[in-house]
Image (cartoon, rainbow, N blue to C red):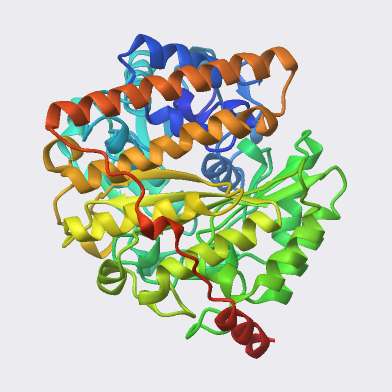
């Protein structure tokens, strides 16, 4: 038996067949036959070695690396949740559970479950794992929950006792984790241990992973100085991970068979940024980063997780050069998650005034159109998110977002995914009300959600087959599931709209307008270099 057992719920332990954005399916309602069938197809059982997780969430691997600075390998085990009993015994002191969305309060879950009216897979599986842990643990063992989703227990503190969790740890804790463990074991730790952002670790306190991460993920930076009001990341200190640590972690994943390096950041285009007034990307640093990764033995492709779209229009040559390094093309699209957030200049000014930099907030729509054209031209496939229900949002703001989506769709051969998310009060807006879509949605935001899902279905029909990298039979099953599931969701949305008396606005003349900010980005690019 093992002293410290680390695990995560099943939604975080599967690779979702490496399909882009398929991880969102962990947030669909659990109590539906169709959704359970879709989830079973899209979330295969992960590989394992006698119950040990061959690949695990990146945050869990970071914590494992920390513990191995003190404990022997035999004393720390990262295991699959359905094998917990093999590792927990009389000598087990802590069961550590990594989580992303334990109570279903994340923006995706709140949207997919109509403001929490239904039960998402994330919450259902987390609760099952905690109950299983409490069932198998010895008397003196502590169940400790941590990870990016631990903030949800601040909103629902009663859930700690209801689920019989001993401790919840919040915040970046690499520099104090071992001390927290000592306090937990000695009985000195509080029920909720919160590490403030001002106490966040320096780079030298963050150890490299020693075992493979899920999706081949490797962190390249933390924090974001763009200061969007609704974003928790904006409160964190900005730090860059040095190239030698990134290389070391990519090599760990490559040796395990990962051929793609997934470079995680809160905004890849802020890597090693030098100009924090305009946020012109540091092109040279980015090219050096991706060139280094692509030269690692065993790595065939690399992709960033997140990026701010205004950086693309600010430096189109950067995207061209990155595409050359990453060997993008018709058979190899590069994914990128980006916050579109809104089509409203007023909301841009009040909640995310620095997001459009180096452009002005009132040019946000034009910048997005320009950036989408640049990305698609270079075989980048952006996945946008929209925030519904931001404080102060009016129907006019939401209709501006509808118009923006129409303009994006009107572009020739436009390729993108766009997902609607419900506002969750984190960041500097902590304390505001959740946007519970079932209670607060109006006709304008209904049209936002409808436009998003309609476009998702279009992309499923057009590109899911080519994006899926698997056997012919698996492709066929996934495509059938995607098409049936997408249409099932669309019928639910349309029926919901009819019951509420909402009308679906047809694309108007705004969608046919031609926008261009070519002059501005090229001038900015010249000055940046």
User: Looking at the image, which residue sits at the far front?
Assistant: 509
Residue 148 sits above or below residue 45 on the image: below
How far from the left and from the top, in percent, is residue 465?
66, 27
How far from the left and from the top, in percent, is residue 55?
64, 31
How far from the left and from the top, in percent, is residue 382?
56, 51
- For image coordinates 58% across by 82% down, the residue present is 519
Residue 77 sits above or below residue 515 on the image: above
Q: Is residue 179 visible?
A: no
- Foreground residue among 459 and 319: 459
Q: Quadrant of the N terminus?
A: top right
User: Looking at the image, which residue sits at the far bottom?
Assistant: 527
- Foreground residue among 236 and 169: 236
- For image coordinates 47% across by 17% down, the residue present is 484
Say whether residue 98 is left or right of residue 350. right
Q: Quadrant of the C terminus?
A: bottom right
- Foreground residue among 213 and 84: 213
Count the labels in the image.
0
Residue 25 occupies quadrant: top left
């Amino acid at each position: 038996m093992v002293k410290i057992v680390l695990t995560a719920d099943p939604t975080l332990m599967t690779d979702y067949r490496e399909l882009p954005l398929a991880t969102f399916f962990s947030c669909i309602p659990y109590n539906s036959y169709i959704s359970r069938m879709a989830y079973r197809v899209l979330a295969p059982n992960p590989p394992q070695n006698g119950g040990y997780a061959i690949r695990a969430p990146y945050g869990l691997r970071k914590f494992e690396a920390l513990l191995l600075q003190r404990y022997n390998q035999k004393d720390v085990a990262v295991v699959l949740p359905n094998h917990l009993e093999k590792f927990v015994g009389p000598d087990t002191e802590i069961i550590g559970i990594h989580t992303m969305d334990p109570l279903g309060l994340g923006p995706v879950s709140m949207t997919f479950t109509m403001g929490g009216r239904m039960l998402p897979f994330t919450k259902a599986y987390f609760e099952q794992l905690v109950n299983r842990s409490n069932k198998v643990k010895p008397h003196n063992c502590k169940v400790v929950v941590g990870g990016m989703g631990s903030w949800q227990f601040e909103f629902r503190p009663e859930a700690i006792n209801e689920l019989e969790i001993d401790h919840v740890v919040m915040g970046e804790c690499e520099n104090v984790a071992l001390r927290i463990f000592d306090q937990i074991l000695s009985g000195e730790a509080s029920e909720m241990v919160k590490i403030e952002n001002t106490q966040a670790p320096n780079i030298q306190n963050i150890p490299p992973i020693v075992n493979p991460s899920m999706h081949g993920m490797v962190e390249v930076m933390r924090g974001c100085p763009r200061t969007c009001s609704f974003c928790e990341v904006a409160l964190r200190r900005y730090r860059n991970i040095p190239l030698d640590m990134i290389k070391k972690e990519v090599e760990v994943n490559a040796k395990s068979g990962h051929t793609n390096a997934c470079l995680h950041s809160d905004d890849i285009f802020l890597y090693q940024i030098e100009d924090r007034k305009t946020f012109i990307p540091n092109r040279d640093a980015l090219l050096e980063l991706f060139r280094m990764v692509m030269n690692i033995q065993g790595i065939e492709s690399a992709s960033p997780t997140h990026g701010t779209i205004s950086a693309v229009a600010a430096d189109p040559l950067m995207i061209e050069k990155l595409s050359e390094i990453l060997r993008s093309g018709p058979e190899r699209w590069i994914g990128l998650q980006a916050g579109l957030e809104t089509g409203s200049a007023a909301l841009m000014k009040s909640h995310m005034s620095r997001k459009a930099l180096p452009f002005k907030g009132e040019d946000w729509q034009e910048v997005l159109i320009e950036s989408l054209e640049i990305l698609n031209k270079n075989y980048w496939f952006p996945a946008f998110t929209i925030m519904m229900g931001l404080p102060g949002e009016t129907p006019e703001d939401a209709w501006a977002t509808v118009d923006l989506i129409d303009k994006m769709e009107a572009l020739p051969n436009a390729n993108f995914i766009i997902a609607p998310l419900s506002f969750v009060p984190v960041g500097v807006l902590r304390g505001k009300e959740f946007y519970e879509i079932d209670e607060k949605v109006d006709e304008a935001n209904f049209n936002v959600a409808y436009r998003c899902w309609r476009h998702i279905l279009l992309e499923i029909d057009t590109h899911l087959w080519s994006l899926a990298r698997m056997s012919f039979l698996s492709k066929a099953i996934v495509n059938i599931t995607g098409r049936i599931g997408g249409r099932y969701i669309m019928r639910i949305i349309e029926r919901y709209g009819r019951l509420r008396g909402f009308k679906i606005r047809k694309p108007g003349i705004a969608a046919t307008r031609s926008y261009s900010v070519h002059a501005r980005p090229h001038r900015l690019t010249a000055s940046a270099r």
